[in-house]
Amino acid sequence: MTLHTPPEDSVTKAQSTADAGPVRKHTALFIGLACVALGLLAAGIVPRLGARAAQVEQVAAQRELIVSTIGPTRAPATQDLLLPGSVMSWADASIYARTSGYVQHWHADIGAHVKAGQTLAQIDTPELDAQLQQARADEATAQANYRFASSTAKRWQTMLKTQSVAEQDAQAKTSDAAAKLATLQAAQANVARLQELVSYQKVIAPFDGVITARNVQVGALVTAGGTPGLATMPGELFHIAQTDRLRVYVDVPQDDAGLVAPGTAVWLTTQQYPGRHFEASVARSSNVIDPVSRTLRVEVDMDNHDGALMPGAYAQVHLALTTASPALELPVSALLFRPDGVTVAVVDAHDKVQLRKVTIGRDFGTYVEIATGLVASDRVIDNPGDAIASGQSVRVAATAAPGGKA
């Protein structure tokens, strides 16, 4: 019996086929494990990479300063300058006796409204009356002496024409008449003086006003004259103030002095009349800057016929100052105060910071006028940090309305 032996190649192929099965299984398993490992690795690394990228982006964004800008606007032409002022009466006078005597009666008390020429008090002057009577008698004597001397001089001049008397004697009579005339004129002047003093028995008001003080009683002895200027005002009988018009003096700072002129609109406000405006006007100024306070003294006049304001009161004076060429204005929050002066931070076309030195003009409180160093098209950083520097890159987050006003 003959056995059939398969060829060697067939045996080899069969063996290879049998060995390839486990190899394929191991390869597939390896690939699967590799895929799982790669999946797990991707699941852990990818979020980390994303977080890292986000962190890098956030750091870059934080390094770039985010700012908001505002645009400067034209400052108002009219500015309300508020200054303190003291209300004073239009006229104020202390009234003294011009003749000595005893107070017979007084007619006006404190708070009384009087008219010009109204009698305030009556002074009894018996000694002055006696002096006036004596002066009138002296005047009558002088008048009689002058008449006699004058008629005598005329007769002697007539006789001189006929050579009846000497020329020297006629001239003597004429000179005597002239002397008697001078004596008469002196007597008449004395009578007029005493009559004027007697007229001062009536103490009268010099102008329309209100009696603010009465320092006299019936029977009190008063003397002519007084000593004005002293605190006690010795000899003062009455004090009168004219209150239908008032004066208010204010001191305008030197920077605004050039904008104040007669006719400038003014109004007053007081605490006792909230919400009420008292119209007034600038009457005049001293035209001189006080070297101590660097201010200009300005007088403001107002009508006070209703008597609402009283002299001596405190008032707030509002001056409407107008400038012909107002500059730009910015809020004070945009200013940087550096050692070399006031500056502002401006963003240029390349989003770079430029620090500009500016000059401040008028002050409006929360806003200031920028006299120099700024143009209307500039983008000014609002609320810049103290560490901001020129050339720094910034990102503009928002741009406010021109001027930043609501």
Image: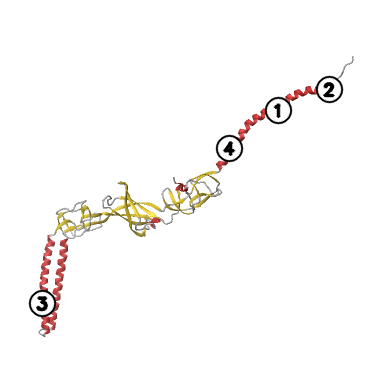
Q: Earlier in the sequence, mark 4 or mark 3?
A: 4
Residue 188 figure quarter? bottom left
Give the CA distance from mark 3 to mark 1.
Answer: 168 Å
**Marks 2/4: CA–CA distance:** 65 Å
Q: How crowded is mark 3: few (under 14 residues within 10 Å), some or many (20 or more)?
A: some
**Nearer the observer, disc 3 or disc 1?**
1
Q: In which quarter of the image is the C terminus?
A: top left
Q: In the current view of this chain or complex, which residue is farthest to the right?
A: 1
Q: Mark 1 points at which residue?
A: 31
Q: Earlier in the sequence, mark 2 or mark 4?
A: 2
- Which numbered dot is residue 10? 2
| Residue 96 in picture, x, y percent from top left | 20, 58
User: Label for residue 55?
Assistant: 4
Q: Residues within 10 Å of mark 1 (few under 14, many from 20)?
A: few
Category of crowding for the residue at label 2, using alpha-carbon neighbours closer than 10 angstroms: few (below 14), some (14–19), many (at least 20) = few
Between label 2 and label 4, give the one nearer the viewer: 2
* Amino acid type, label 2: Ser
Question: Quick one: quadrant of the N terminus?
Answer: top right
Q: Is residue 17 above or below residue 133?
A: above
Asked whether the residues under the numbered discs 3 and 2 touch, taking CB atoms below 8 Å apart as contact, a structural biologist would say no
- Quadrant for residue 97, please give it: bottom left
- The residue lying furthest to the top in this view is 1
Q: Distance between the residues labelled 3 and 2?
A: 198 Å
Tell me where residue 117 appears, x and y as whole percent: 19, 58
- In percent of the image, x 67 and y 30: which residue is there? 38
Marks 1/2: CA–CA distance: 31 Å
Please tell me whether mark 3 sits on a helix, a strand or a loop.
helix
The CA distance from mark 4 to mark 1 is: 35 Å
Q: Which of marks 3 and 2 is nearer the N terminus?
A: 2
Q: From the image, tell me which residue sits under label 3.
A: 151
